[in-house]
Image: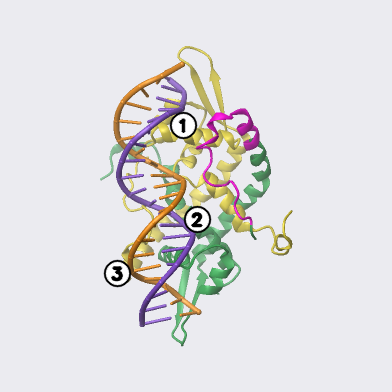
Chain colours: A green, B yellow, C purple, D orange
Amino acid sequence: MPTIDAVEAGPGRDTLLRDVMDRIGDKWSMAVICRLEEGPLRFNALRRAVDGITQRMLSITVRRLERDGLITRTVEPSLPPRVEYALTERGGSLHRVLADLVAWTEDNLDAILRDRESYDAAHPEGAATSSPAASQAPRAS
Amino acid sequence: MPTIDAVEAGPGRDTLLRDVMDRIGDKWSMAVICRLEEGPLRFNALRRAVDGITQRMLSITVRRLERDGLITRTVEPSLPPRVEYALTERGGSLHRVLADLVAWTEDNLDAILRDRESYDAAHPEGAATSSPAASQAPRAS
DNA sequence: CGGTATCCTTATAGATACTG
DNA sequence: CAGTATCTATAAGGATACCG
């Protein structure tokens, strides 16, 4: 039974955001969704398409996405087995939302990078703890 | 100088997504952005508004957001000092995109939760490694 | 009030090896 | 081909204490 606070403050937008972010905010989920949006792929094809992902992380990621109904996993019992992954309707709708996020990033990334340089120049000491990773990613396709 | 691969494959949507996710995919950034969208707040007011955040994490989070030009930090040199945080234009535009993500979550969360139960029921063994945290968050406003 | 500094626990993910 | 298992490194985040 929820306390009365839950009623007062509305649905808690930020809590909902946390819910979705916990799902897609990990290192590989979005990349997998984006690759599958272009069409279904088998495990190793997906592995090659994502670039940098390990077999283990792809395995974990597709299982999570399947669990949330964002992708399907279809096993064709041949020898060797064919396992195909494809985006669901729900996964596709999520991808559309994410596309807006990509567009926003395209519009703002350069300015952010510049602001960041200025900030670091103005705050020489506290350079540590400023941003997670983001330093030099491989920058592949 | 980029290699020729960078030209061939397009802008790399998933890499861009990773860029923005690295920025806002952490545990607290979105919550801070959402609270500030309702109006500027001072440090401790923001701390109380976010619910669950520690002083340390708020400190780190606002510094990162300021560094990326998503919020401003204004110090009024009184005694005791007043430090006010406010969303920038850029932060506001990001919030608008995030709002779509919230809406998507509102539309899909219940179904996802149900799918997840079915999945767990159908896959009793591999219950571990399935989802990060997400089990029982405090569920406050 | 508005933070830092320090310590510690746990999640995330990489490497590697092995299997049906 | 399509995964699992194990082990390890790192970093995100929480608890606590202290400072200008």
Q: Residue at x 57, y 55 (%)?
A: A98
The answer to whether the residue labelled 2 contacts the one labelled 1, judged by CB atoms less than 8 Å apart, is: no
Chain at numbered mark 2? A
How dense is the environment of label 2, judged by Cα within 10 Å: few (below 14), some, or many (20 and up)? some
Q: Which residues are magenta?
A: A116-139
Chain at numbered mark 3? B
Q: Residue at x 46, y 31 (%)?
A: B59
| Residue underneath mark 3 | B125
- Dot 1: element: helix
Image spot of residue C11 (x, y percent)? 38, 52
**Vertical side of A25 occupied by C16: above or below:** below
- Residue B99 in the magenta stretch? The answer is no
Q: What's the distance in space between the residues labelled 2 and 1, CA to CA?
A: 24 Å
Q: Residue at x 36, y 52 (%)?
A: B133
Residue B84 vs residue A61, the one in the foreground = A61
Q: Residue B59, labelled with which disc?
A: 1
